[in-house]
């Protein structure tokens, strides 16, 4: 049976689901691993589960020829070299929906706290100052929430914001159907200039690095606040620091940062640490018991289905083939370079071996082709070796 390694204290729901699916060889390690330690831990692993602190780049993949799948038990996949993984025939799975509610609730809570100036009053109370004042404190009702990135989380934030009486506007580079009474804005600049709260929910991409610049921050009202629970490099931190210290912005809340400690032993460093009107949280947007339990089940299910049936539905870097129950004696998973003639040669090899193809499912994605072939008899080691020896083959596995 396949060996699965789970790092970084992944929720117990993952191991429970994997065991229920028949996977008994599960190794759980409590922390992230670097370089040589990671390679050693995964030397004989068929699949690995990680969170955000473990990085699996091209060098690591080059030394792990037996690794078949990677599960990111979180939303982001920036910690994995997706292109290198695909080139090694390794699909990568994540959990894009499971912590949506948790992140959305945190954003709404931060919006209320910032507009009421609670962080400042809390900090001063801890220092012995009793600042009982309504100056600069506002209700969220009838305030405008500007959502940048109207995907799963952004849309959920909008729904919750309307429930507490906010007006919701959003900007997205793609046309998105509004939920509730949300209104799209024609430009990022238009949204930032009219919003009382700006919240960021964009993906990690080169186009979103320093999306929020000094010039764009200057468009915001001095009574407005900024919230970032998306990616750490989306906001120019130095520009934000300047805006806050010059009182051109009323406050901010950040859950993600350009550089984050790998564990609780490393110091968190930020120029914003001494500002009372800033909420700093350690990347915990999805860190609720409910979200982690859901994430554990979602990603574990994807890993189990790939290892048992070859399913790649919702893989972030790979041709997607939906769940197909294995009903024949043998199933061959063939990952190859997407070039002419590969399938014809493979099928000729099956025919020459006297095997009847019961079902075959092919999908391609960029330079990668992936085909699942079900045959009505056993596959000899000679045939499997021949399929693996095909010049275009990246990986060939037998189930």
Image (cartoon, grey):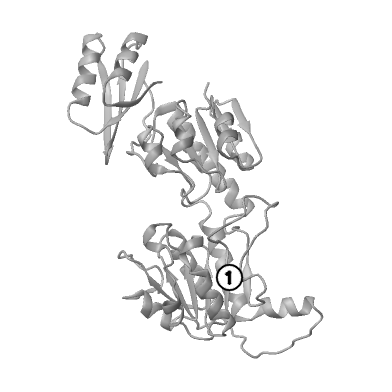
Residue 342 in view here: yes
Check the image and report above or below for 391 versus 194: above
In the rendered image, the residue lying farthest to the right is 128
Quadrant of the image occupied by residue 288: bottom right
Residue pictured at 58% horizontal, 65% vertical: 106
Which quarter of the figure has residue 195? bottom left
In the rendered view, tell whether residue 146 sits above or below residue 290.
below
Left or right: residue 296 compared with residue 331? right
Q: Residue at x 59, y 71 (%)?
A: 110
The residue where tag 1 is placed is: 253
Residue at the location (41% across, 28% down)? Answer: 309
**Residue 184 visible, this orientation:** no
Split into 4 quadrants, where in the image is the C terminus?
top left
- Residue 238 % position (x, y): 53, 72
What percent of the width, then of the height, locates residue 65? 45, 26
- Judged from the image, the secondary structure of the residue bearing numbered disc 1 is strand
Q: In this view, does 49 lie to the left or right of 363?
A: right
Residue at position x 37%, y 37% in the image:
86
Left or right: residue 396 versus residue 34 is: left
Residue 152, percent across and down?
43, 59
Question: Residue 123 appears at what percent x and percent y?
Answer: 73, 76
Q: Is residue 128 left or right of residue 290?
A: right
């Amino acid at each position: 049976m396949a060996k699965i390694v789970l790092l970084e204290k992944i929720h117990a729901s993952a191991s429970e689901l994997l065991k229920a699916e028949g996977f008994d060889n599960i190794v759980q390690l409590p922390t992230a691993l670097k370089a040589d330690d990671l390679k050693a831990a995964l030397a004989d692993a068929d699949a690995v589960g990680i969170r955000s602190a473990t990085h699996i780049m091209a060098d690591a993949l080059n030394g792990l020829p037996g690794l078949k799948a990677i599960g990111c038990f979180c939303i982001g996949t920036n910690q994995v070299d997706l292109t290198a993984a695909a080139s090694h025939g390794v699909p990568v799975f994540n959990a894009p929906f499971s912590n949506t509610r948790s992140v959305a609730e945190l954003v709404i809570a931060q919006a209320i706290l910032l507009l009421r100036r609670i962080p400042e009053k809390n900090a001063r109370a801890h220092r012995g100052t009793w600042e009982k004042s309504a100056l600069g404190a506002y209700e969220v009702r009838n305030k405008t929430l500007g959502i940048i990135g109207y995907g799963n989380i952004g849309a959920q934030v909008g729904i919750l914001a309307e429930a507490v009486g906010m007006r919701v506007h959003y900007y997205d580079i793609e046309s998105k159907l509004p939920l509730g009474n949300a209104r799209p804005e024609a430009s990022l600049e238009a949204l930032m200039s009219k919003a009382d709260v700006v919240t960021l929910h964009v993906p990690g991409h080169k186009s979103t690095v320093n999306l929020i610049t000094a010039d764009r921050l200057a468009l915001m009202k001095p009574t407005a606040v900024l919230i970032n629970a998306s990616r750490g490099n989306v906001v120019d931190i130095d520009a934000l620091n300047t805006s806050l210290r010059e009182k051109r912005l009323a406050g901010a809340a950040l859950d993600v940062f350009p550089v984050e400690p790998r564990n609780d032993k490393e110091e968190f460093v930020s120029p914003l640490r001494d500002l009372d009107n800033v909420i700093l949280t350690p990347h915990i947007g999805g860190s609720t018991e409910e979200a982690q339990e859901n994430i554990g089940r979602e990603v574990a299910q994807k890993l189990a289905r790939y290892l048992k049936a070859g399913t790649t539905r919702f893989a972030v870097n790979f041709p997607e083939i939906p769940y197909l129950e294995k009903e024949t004696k043998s199933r061959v998973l063939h990952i190859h370079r997407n070039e002419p003639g590969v399938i014809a040669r493979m099928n000729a090899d099956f025919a020459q071996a006297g095997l009847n193809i019961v079902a075959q499912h092919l999908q391609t994605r960029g330079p990668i082709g992936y085909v699942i072939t079900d045959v009505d008899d056993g596959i000899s080691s000679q045939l499997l070796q021949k399929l693996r020896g095909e010049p275009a083959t990246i990986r060939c596995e037998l189930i």
